[in-house]
Amino acid sequence: MEKIGALKGIYRDILSAGDGRIIHDSGWVSNTIVDRCRILLAGFVKNESSSGGIQFLAVGRGLDAWDKEGPPASEPAATIDLVNRHAPPLPVNRLNIVYLDEAASVVANPTNRLQITATLVPGYPPPLAPLNTYPLREFGLFGRFDGNDYMINSIRHPVIHKDADATLVRVIRLYF
């Protein structure tokens, strides 16, 4: 697929213990905007009634093998899903979505920059037995077109062990 112009994404994860202490801060890291995001954008611009924007954020365990060799890079051509996705995902009404200006300040009017903040509260996702944590290795934003989920972006990252008392705040910025 010929690429015209660049879509860009970055994310930041901040993991806090139950007492509020910060355990992990990834800093800003690039993510992959997948090709199907462009299809969603084209459907929106064409005014397709079956095209929907962001519908949910999904998190996944990925594969244990990624811990030894590092996670594989996210593929721009990814079309389907995450590996070992947790259900249920976080629906759009649990995400904070705002426009940003060039200085990364929140503004009321539409811009070419979005910030999506997802808070994975204590207990979400629940620990996996026999572990007392849930191993997070990937996430993605999804939209909907013709009743099918379309991945918008994809991230695979080193494992984050989120215990039942921890909170993970995941901030995603998309630049169009």
Image (cartoon, grey):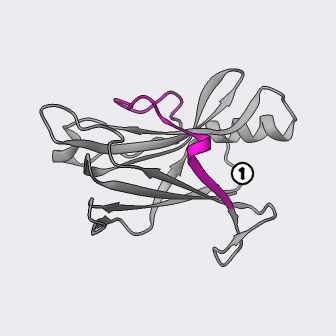
Residue flagged by tag 1: what amino acid is it?
A: Ile
* Secondary-structure class at tag 1: loop
| Horizontal and vertical percent position of residue 155 | 43, 48
| Residue in the foreground of this view, choosing between 129 and 83 | 129
State yes or no: residue 94 in magenta.
yes
Q: Position of residue 83 (x, y in %)?
A: 36, 31
Q: In the rendered image, which residue does mark 1 sit on?
A: 4
In the image: residue 42, left or right of residue 142: right
Examine the structure image and report whether residue 21 is included in the region drawn in magenta.
no
Query: Which image quadrant for residue 43?
Result: top right
Q: Residues within 10 Å of mark 1 (few under 14, many from 20)?
A: few
Residue at the image position 60 percent from the left and 27 percent from the top? 149
Which x, y percent locates residue 82?
42, 33
The image shows residue 100 at horizontal and vertical percentages of 68, 67
The residue positioned 44% from the left and 67% from the top of the image is 28
Vertical position of residue 54 compared to residue 86: above or below: below
- The span shown in magenta is 78-98
Q: Is residue 167 left or right of residue 170?
A: left
Q: Quadrant of residue 12?
A: bottom left
Q: Residue furthest left?
A: 130
In this rendering, the answer to whether 23 lies above or below 53 is below
Identify whether 139 is placed above or below 85. below
Horizontal relation, residue 4 to residue 161: left or right: right
Most extreme residue toward the top is 147
Q: Residue at x 72, y 51 (%)?
A: 4
